[in-house]
């Protein structure tokens, strides 16, 4: 029994989709589905949801690395078997949620989670990520498994979360803060509406591997991939290839996505940009995009100190100064971006003034500014 | 004894946040001593650490560009990945990704996860992402001969299919919805599951101009971020009145209940002030509090959720619930980032979802016909215009769809808009108007 390479279509099953979610719901969730009345955050990382039937579900939320070994998942299962009747869930932001249906089961679960550490000393299951505080950073693959990254992902996330660890476990911020990381402009993790976005960018035009480009790439696709029309066909040493007008390159890397013979990543050229003030929720103000406030920070493995430092400056200027319920972007808009740079101590440079399409709408057409 | 020295990665074992380096190391050790008849390289994890350490030194990634691998009959779900230093790190020479379609809202039984772990320990690296950015379970790293074996075991033993990749419907995802949230305006888990099943062909066999994402948020809080990252964002809403429990409002004012479900309890923000914190922050100023009774002029409410978030015991979403449908969000590549544009202000979302399916198919038919290669729906809408898009959707123009009317008067009138059409005789014109 099993797959037979000699007869690959034998007993083949396709198009069956994911497992039905109803197979996986804990009884208290199934019984109270659609009947929830209200919730409370009992302490950072601990929620209670109350149903109209009177039933309650207690949730302990813990941070997780989205990169996880099967050994670690088995440990998560062991905890869920011991305390939660064999059920658990993951959140959109890579947290793990353990649920129990009785308050008495909460303390042993929390103590168990708290006691577990990796061999290197880090916490396996830090409790937190709720309410007006910092939750987990959503991120992309980075150097561990992607072919187009400008920066690492897991390493930067670890460095930032280590530094902000206490705020993952607290709720002292004016509103919740969502930090996200995408390791290149493709943004497979869309970070462009985050309170703080860590984004991998390039600063060098693609290298051209003329020797192989004609064979490796569909040249018309590489040309069409360029949003600024900077790529044109060329013959180099008798071989079909392309030429790039470097002056027009916006370093998006879209050509490399279409053509492996045009690599951009570079030790000096690639690094981190920081964007701030975006949001998803419609609460009070409308959803908004994040804005670039730090154009470039070099890659500094293993702990990216300059990136961590800039994030702390932004975050703590906001935490100090914002009003209750005010998201980072709402705060920046209220005080004005001129004040934002003053209060965070970040330098304002020409790189931060938009010169792409529709840039005009981001310049100031009024005399209402602050000195 | 570790196969490769990793002094830089070892720095990432320090600190309190869970260390992915420690986790990969424990997996590497377990692979070293396991009795399982591993079908993928034993050194996958230790060589991955070695390769990552080298990347930390070089500061440029060591994975080659792409590589076409997959399972027979599908055009997505597996992503090829090859290391550019295969001699030094043979355990990750080929290290392909398998995307596995996650269940709605990511609830699991441990039984299922343990089965998946057993499969992946034996036939892959033992490393995963729980979960990838789009929502899939990502199985990270296996060799080409294992791919069909894994697919066979997933479908036969786990009753589980792959997710999407490439120019197809990407694996849909949703918020927790009615599973554990009082704000859910429709059943996100059911809709996510049903549409995923309905469009299996579109998910597995890339036939679109580019990727297409569905995401389902149960309310305007938007926990699954559909408005920023889905080509079609379905966001729960309601069109009747917010339900008020006046006694519970007094409970908040009197300090009996913590505002915002206790979300701000880490700092002393002073006594709860309903005037300042709720009435004054309402974006449409449609609320009043006279010290005894809370009034909401629901007709003026834009359902931003703030008052409900602050007083969840006192205020509840309405009962005539459904969803707003928005189209066209995407990350910056290529034409700049876009958020989804409100297209259907309100639609009832109830099984069998015929109205929504009809809308989806109209949009896909047009995009498949008119979209350029690698043009996301949002970019196509910008190119052809929103007027054209709603015509395609067979919708009437509605002021709710726009932020403001156009400020330029360059209206692209059509001939049929003008009585008598555009045909004129210049000779007749000249009879009245000399040159």
Image: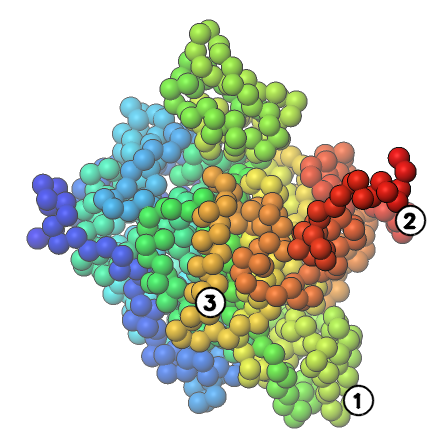
Q: Residue A325 location in percent, x, y?
A: 70, 67
Rendering quarter of residue B350? bottom left
Query: Where residue B290 is drawn, which disc sits there?
Result: 1
Q: CA distance from mark 3 to mark 1?
A: 43 Å
Q: Name the residue: 45% across, 44% down.
A: B209
Mark 3–mark 2 contact, CB under 8 Å?
A: no
Measured Cα–Cα span from mark 1 to mark 2: 39 Å
Residue matched to label 2:
A367
Outermost residue, top side: A237
Mark 3, chain letter?
Answer: B
Q: Nearer the viewer, residue B91 or B394?
A: B394
- Name the residue that disc number 3 marks: B356
Asked whether residue A2 is in view, the answer is: yes
Between label 3 and label 2, give the one nearer the viewer: 3
- Mark in front: 1 vs 2: 2
The residue at 52%/32% (across/down) is A225
Q: Horizontal placement of B84 versus B341: left or right?
A: left
- Disc 3 is placed on an element classified as helix
Horizontal side of residue B387 vs B157, given as left or right: right
Query: Where's residue A67, x and y in %?
Result: 40, 49
Q: How is the image coloured?
A: rainbow
């Amino acid at each position: 029994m099993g797959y037979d390479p000699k007869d690959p279509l034998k007993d083949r099953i396709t198009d069956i989709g994911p497992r039905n979610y109803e197979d996986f719901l804990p009884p208290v969730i199934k019984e109270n589905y659609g009947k929830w009345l209200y919730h409370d955050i009992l302490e950072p990382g601990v929620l209670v949801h109350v149903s109209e039937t009177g039933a309650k579900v207690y949730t302990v939320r813990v941070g997780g690395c989205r990169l996880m070994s099967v050994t670690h998942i088995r440990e998560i299962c062991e905890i869920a078997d011991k305390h939660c009747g064999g059920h658990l869930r993951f959140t959109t932001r890579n947290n793990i949620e353990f649920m129990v249906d009785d308050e008495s089961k909460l303390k042993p679960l929390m103590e168990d989670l708290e006691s577990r550490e990796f061999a290197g000393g880090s916490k396996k299951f830090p409790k937190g990520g709720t309410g007006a505080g910092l939750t987990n950073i959503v991120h992309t693959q980075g150097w561990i498994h992607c072919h187009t990254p400008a920066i690492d992902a897991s390493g930067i996330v670890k460095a930032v979360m280590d530094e902000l660890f206490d705020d993952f476990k607290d709720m002292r911020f004016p509103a919740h803060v969502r930090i996200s990381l995408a390791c290149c402009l493709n943004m497979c993790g869309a970070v462009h509406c985050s309170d703080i976005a860590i984004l991998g960018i390039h600063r060098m035009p693609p290298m051209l591997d003329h020797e192989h480009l004609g064979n490796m790439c569909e040249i018309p696709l590489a040309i069409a991939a360029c949003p600024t029309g900077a790529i044109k066909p060329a013959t180099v040493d008798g071989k079909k290839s392309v030429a790039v007008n470097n002056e027009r390159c916006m370093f998006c890397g879209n050509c490399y996505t279409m053509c492996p013979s045009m690599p951009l990543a570079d030790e000096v050229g690639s690094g981190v940009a920081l964007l701030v003030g975006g949001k998803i929720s419609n609460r009070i103000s409308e959803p908004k995009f994040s804005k670039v406030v730090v154009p470039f920070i070099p890659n500094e493995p293993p702990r990216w100190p300059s990136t961590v430092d800039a994030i702390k400056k932004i975050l703590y200027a906001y935490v100090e100064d914002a009003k209750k319920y005010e998201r980072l972007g709402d705060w920046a808009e209220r005080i004005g971006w001129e004040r934002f740079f003053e209060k965070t101590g970040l330098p304002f440079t020409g790189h931060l003034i938009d010169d792409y399409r529709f840039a005009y709408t981001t310049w100031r057409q009024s005399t209402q500014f602050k000195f | 004894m570790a196969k490769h020295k990793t002094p830089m990665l070892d720095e990432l074992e320090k600190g309190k946040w869970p260390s992915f380096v420690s986790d990969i190391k424990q997996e590497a050790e377990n692979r070293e001593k396991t009795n399982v008849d591993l079908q993928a390289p034993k050194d996958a994890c230790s060589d991955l650490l070695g390769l990552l350490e080298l990347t930390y030194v070089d500061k440029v990634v060591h994975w080659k560009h792409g590589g076409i691998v997959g399972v027979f009959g599908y055009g997505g779900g597996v992503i090829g990945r090859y290391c550019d230093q295969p001699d030094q790190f043979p355990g990750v020479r080929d290290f392909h990704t398998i995307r596995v379609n996650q269940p709605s809202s990511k609830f699991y039984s441990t039984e299922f996860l343990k089965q998946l772990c057993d499969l992946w320990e034996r036939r892959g690296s033992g490393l995963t992402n729980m979960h990838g950015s789009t929502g899939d379970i990502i199985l990270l790293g296996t060799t080409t001969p294992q791919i069909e074996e894994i697919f066979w075991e997933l479908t036969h033993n786990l009753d589980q299919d792959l997710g999407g990749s490439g120019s197809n419907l990407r694996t849909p995802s949703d918020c927790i919805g009615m599973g554990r949230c009082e704000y859910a305006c429709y059943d996100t888990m059911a809709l996510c599951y049903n549409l995923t099943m309905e469009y299996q062909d579109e998910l597995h066999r890339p036939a679109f101009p580019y990727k297409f994402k569905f995401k389902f948020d149960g309310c305007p809080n938007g926990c699954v971020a559909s408005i920023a990252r889905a080509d079609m964002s379905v966001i729960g809403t309601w069109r009747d009145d917010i339900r008020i429990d006046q006694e519970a409002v007094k409970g908040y004012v009197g300090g009996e209940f913590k505002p915002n479900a206790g979300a701000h309890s880490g700092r002393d923000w002073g006594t709860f002030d309903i005037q300042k914190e709720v009435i004054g922050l309402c974006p449409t100023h449609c609320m009043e509090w006279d010290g005894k009774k809370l009034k909401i002029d629901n007709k003026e409410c834009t359902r931003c959720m703030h008052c409900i978030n602050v007083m969840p015991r006192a205020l509840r979403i309405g009962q005539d619930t459904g969803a707003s449908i928005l189209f066209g969000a995407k990350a910056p590549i290529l034409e700049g980032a876009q958020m989804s544009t409100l297209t259907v202000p309100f639609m009832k979302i109830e099984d069998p979802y015929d109205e929504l399916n009809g809308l989806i198919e109209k949009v896909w038919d047009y995009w498949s016909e008119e979209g350029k290669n690698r043009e996301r729906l949002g970019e196509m809408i910008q190119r052809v215009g929103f007027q054209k898009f709603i015509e395609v959707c067979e919708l009437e123009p509605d002021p709710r769809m726009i932020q403001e009317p156009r400020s330029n008067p360059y209206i692209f009138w059509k001939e049929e808009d003008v009585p008598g059409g555009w045909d004129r005789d210049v000779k007749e014109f000249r009879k009245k108007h000399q040159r």
